[in-house]
């Protein structure tokens, strides 16, 4: 059930989807990938979002394999200080802060 709570991260206001979803579809829109590649990319992005919002550090988390990926802990920090003018604007990659 803990991982299912991260699934709620996929719910968003349409304006949020327009602005924040742009980064997910910009690359595929520019490169015009095969339909299968597009679906794999979208599934990976959804799984990454669910993982980041789950609140748990799983063995299959991208933070175990990608050195600059912040993971759940970094994303929780992002939500905690986002509105405190701390300069934490990155939600995933630690090199952006």
Image (cartoon, helix red, strand yellow):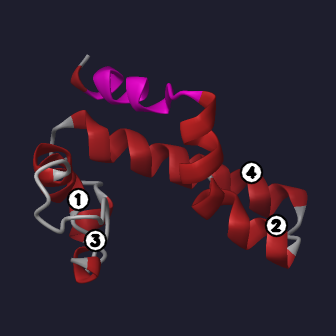
Please give the label number shown on residue 44. Answer: none
Q: What is the distance, in whole Å, between disc 3 and disc 1 at their CAs?
A: 6 Å
Among numbered discs 4 and 1, the one appearing first in the sequence: 4
Start-end of magenta stretch: 3-13
Q: What is the distance, in whole Å, between disc 4 and disc 1 at their CAs?
A: 23 Å
Residue that mark 3 sits on: 69
Residue that mark 4 sits on: 39
Dot in front, 2 or 1: 2
Q: What is the distance, in whole Å, between disc 2 and disc 1 at their CAs?
A: 26 Å
Among numbered discs 2 and 1, the one appearing first in the sequence: 2
Q: What is the distance, in whole Å, between disc 4 and disc 2 at their CAs?
A: 13 Å
Q: What is the distance, in whole Å, between disc 3 and disc 4 at their CAs?
A: 22 Å
Among numbered discs 3 and 4, the one appearing first in the sequence: 4
Is 11 left or right of 55, judged from the image as shown? right
Among numbered discs 2 and 3, the one appearing first in the sequence: 2
Dot in front, 2 or 3: 2
Tell me whether circle 3 and circle 1 mark residues in contact (CB < 8 Å).
yes
Please give the label number shown on residue 71. Answer: 1
The quarter in which the N terminus is drawn is top left
Callout 2: 10 Å neighbours few (<14), some, many (20+)? Answer: few
Q: Secondary structure at mark 4?
A: helix
Residue that mark 2 sits on: 29
Q: Secondary structure at mark 3?
A: loop
Residue at 89% x, 71% y is 32
Task: Provide the major secondary structure of the magenta segment.
Answer: helix
Residue at 18% x, 47% y is 83
């Amino acid at each position: 059930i803990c991982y299912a709570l991260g699934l709620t991260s996929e719910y968003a206001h349409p304006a949020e989807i327009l602005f924040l979803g742009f980064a997910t579809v910009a690359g595929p829109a520019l490169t015009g990938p095969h339909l299968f590649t597009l679906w794999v990319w979208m599934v990976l992005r959804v799984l990454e979002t669910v993982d980041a919002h789950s609140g748990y550090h799983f063995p299959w988390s991208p933070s175990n394999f990608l050195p600059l990926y912040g993971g759940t802990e970094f994303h929780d920090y992002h939500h905690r200080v986002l509105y405190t003018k701390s300069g934490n604007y990155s939600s995933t990659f630690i090199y952006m802060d």
